[in-house]
Image (cartoon, coloured by chain):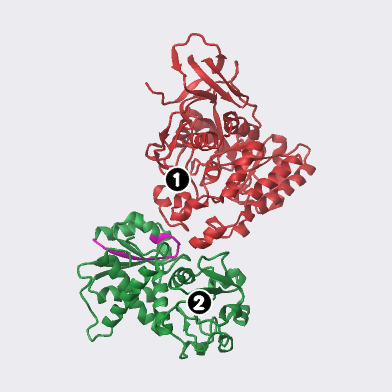
Amino acid sequence: MRHLLDFGGWTRQEVESLLDTAKVMAEVLQRPVKKVPALQGFTVATVFFEPSTRTRLSFELAARRMSADVVSFTAQTSSLQKGESYKDTLLTLEAMGVDAYVIRADAAGVPHQATRWVKGVVVNGGDGRRAHPTQALLDAYTLLEALGSLEGKKIAIVGDILHSRVARSNAELLPLLGAEVWCAGPPSLLPQALPGARLTPSLEEALAEADAVMVLRLQRERMEAGLVNLQDYIAHYQVTEARLRRAKPQAPLLHPGPMNRDVELEGTLADSERSLVARQVQNGVAVRMAVLYHLLVGKERA
Amino acid sequence: MILIKNVRLVDALGERGPADVLIGEGRILSLEGGDAPQVVEGRGLFLAPGFLDLHAHLREPGEEVKEDLATGLQAAVRGGYTDLVSMPNTKPPVDTPEAVGALKEKAARLGLARLHPAAALTQGQEGLRLTEAGLLKAAGAALLTDDGRTNEDAGVLALGLIQAAPLGLPVAVHAEDASLRRGGVMNDGRLADLLGLPGNPPEAEAARIARDLEVLRYALRRSPVPPRLHVQHLSTRRGLELLREAKRAGLPVTAEATPHHLTLTEEGLRGFDPLFKVAPPLRTQEDREALLEGLLDGTLDAIATDHAPHTLAEKEQDLLRAPFGIPSLEVAFPLLYTELHQKRGLPLPRLVALFTDGPRKVLGLPPLHLVEGAEASLVLLSPQERPVDPSRFASKARFSPWAGALLGGWPVLTLVAGRVVHQALEP
């Protein structure tokens, strides 16, 4: 496979090999001169049909750290509704000689569709509710750093599971590394099924003896759509110091960001020693370097 | 005069022949031959009454970039249709006698398939104020529907049924509870969850059918003449069950299913291809099997295409933005001939009836059979297989989820009242 769309069909060995590369990249990022020539001559485009800052910057930095040329396309959703098409945008970039496309879109499947339109490699930078594979990879990398191994480890993911591409990708990826994934959230925000994960409306059940806890952002539009009541949510699903006592002592806390402090988690927890949020962002660059390297230079699936 | 020799006859009455069908003066003059200047060798082919499509979007007026009467009716005759009901959800909607008259007149000038425009049930299809049913009927409207929009106000629908009843106009409904559907773009279920796409639950269809059947009961009780309700593009097992019960109870309700709901399932969307995005959405295999049963037991009266042309650029958007719909006038019969008759054993006379007498009954038209004296609106069909090639569609919408599929049962000659409107016979 030449693209990174999701983790369908991936093996543990492939994931581990990619994360090993990420380790090497992390070392590069520790050097005084944080740059290698690995992708010299390649052009990477970040094509963000949906607004996002941190993911785009992380990818662009990753590409630049490996000496790739980077072009960036960002569009507000509204301009697409005015008739600008994804396909034309991508074909324009292809005509400019782009080798890899990092695509972010509000609709599931756009990166899959893109592979039918362009010859270059496609990296899913987050598509609708569907997948956010590099986020899951950096989460896995961060968890491995903290826990050593994920074999037999219970990872609790808490929040709006239904609309979360982060939850979907982690539920696909973490079991490949031996972890047991529990997803907890209000019934209206749980899917019917999520391959690789156990679903529960009980936060307590998900947190019990958890080795790590990943908190998801509660989006305002879910409240407006009547799917959840904010005060109810805080009362029953906010990850608090007290509730975290159900998890294993010192179980680390992850969040893909941006955070709503005091909504999905107690504000002080975000700054506590348990929090790996900054580490996640840091590891994001190394993991994305590894992904681009594997796809462009390795010419094999990472 | 045309003579079709040695041809097998298939209509709702059964299969028979071979016969030598002599056609003249717009009628079937004889099934035992005679002299004619044009002779067609019908050996290996079969002849059926011309098809009637209850549900096609021809996009005129307003969206001729997607389709117009000329291309749409050309696509129809290539598909074996001699008669076609166009949906009124154009821009602007067809909600006045003038608009109906203009469509009828233009279609007549084209001399292809005969157009029976559907008119909007409510002004502007807004669901609030009823249109002028009597004047619409006089102008040539064949049924009333706000298709594409759901009738949220049950009272308006009831009045519409009562108003249309003495005119003999059926009222067709897009049965879907919009509040349950929300923003759903595919069947709600495990696959939608897996693909991360918003789901449109099967219960949205069943809930609205259940309500509409109660509305029909009320209208039936209040109306001196029985009203007729027609349920469009049925997609769910539960919806079918509700209709079956209603029909058993003797309610004056009819229903249609589309070629895509009869042959495809939600699995088509696994590759995120918007060609498979339709409304109502493709459902599960279980729903599909239920529809097939409905074809056999008579719960479904007709196969209607819901031919919904769009530009390719629109269809190449993402799954949230791409419009709903598949163009299918040109492939509907070959598709179902191959998938339902050849592969699933649906008897050919039953299949043909679902394209002819079934839809005719919905419109209140008499059956059309291959007997001497009958109107010569006919289609000659060839079992020879060839692949679906959207690039050769007459429709402006040159894409298809069945592209490349090898199908038999292609129309090779279509006659409207004895006049050849489509001919693709091997020389």
**Of A260 and B418, the residue lying toward us:** A260
- Whole-Å distance between the Cαs marked 1 and 2? 38 Å
* Residue at point 52%, 70% (across, down): A197
- Left or right: where B210 falls relative to B317: right
**Residue A105 lies in the magenta stretch:** yes
Q: Quadrant of residue B19?
A: top right
**Figure check: B349 above or below B315:** above
Q: Nearer the viewer, residue A252 or A108?
A: A252
Q: Residue at x 33, y 73 (%)?
A: A288
Q: Position of residue B145 (x, y in %)?
A: 62, 44
Residue A72 lies in quadrant = bottom left
Q: Secondary structure at mark 2?
A: loop
Report whether residue A59 is seen: no
Instruction: Measuring from the top left, give residue B288's x and y in whole percent.
Output: 58, 46
Q: Chain of mark 2?
A: A
Residue highlighted by disc 2: A217
Which chain can be seen in red? B
Q: Is residue B415 above or below residue A65?
A: above
On the question of residue A49 being in view, the answer is yes
Residue type, mark 1 in image: Pro
Please indicate whether residue B122 sits to the left or right of residue B115 in the image: right
Check disc 1 and report its element: helix, strand or loop: loop
Task: Identify which amino acid the numbered label 2 is placed on.
Answer: Arg
- Where is the N terminus of chain A found, in terms of image quarters? bottom left
| Res B163 → quadrant | top right
Q: Residue furthest top?
A: B35
Looking at the rendering, the stretch of residues picked out in magenta corresponds to: A97-111
Q: In the rendered picture, chain A carries what hue?
A: green
Q: Is residue B345 left or right of residue A138?
A: right
The disc at residue B401 is 1
Q: Quadrant of the C terminus of chain A?
A: bottom left
At label 1, counting other C-alpha atoms closer than 10 Å, the crowd grade (few under 14, some 14-19, many 20 or more) is some
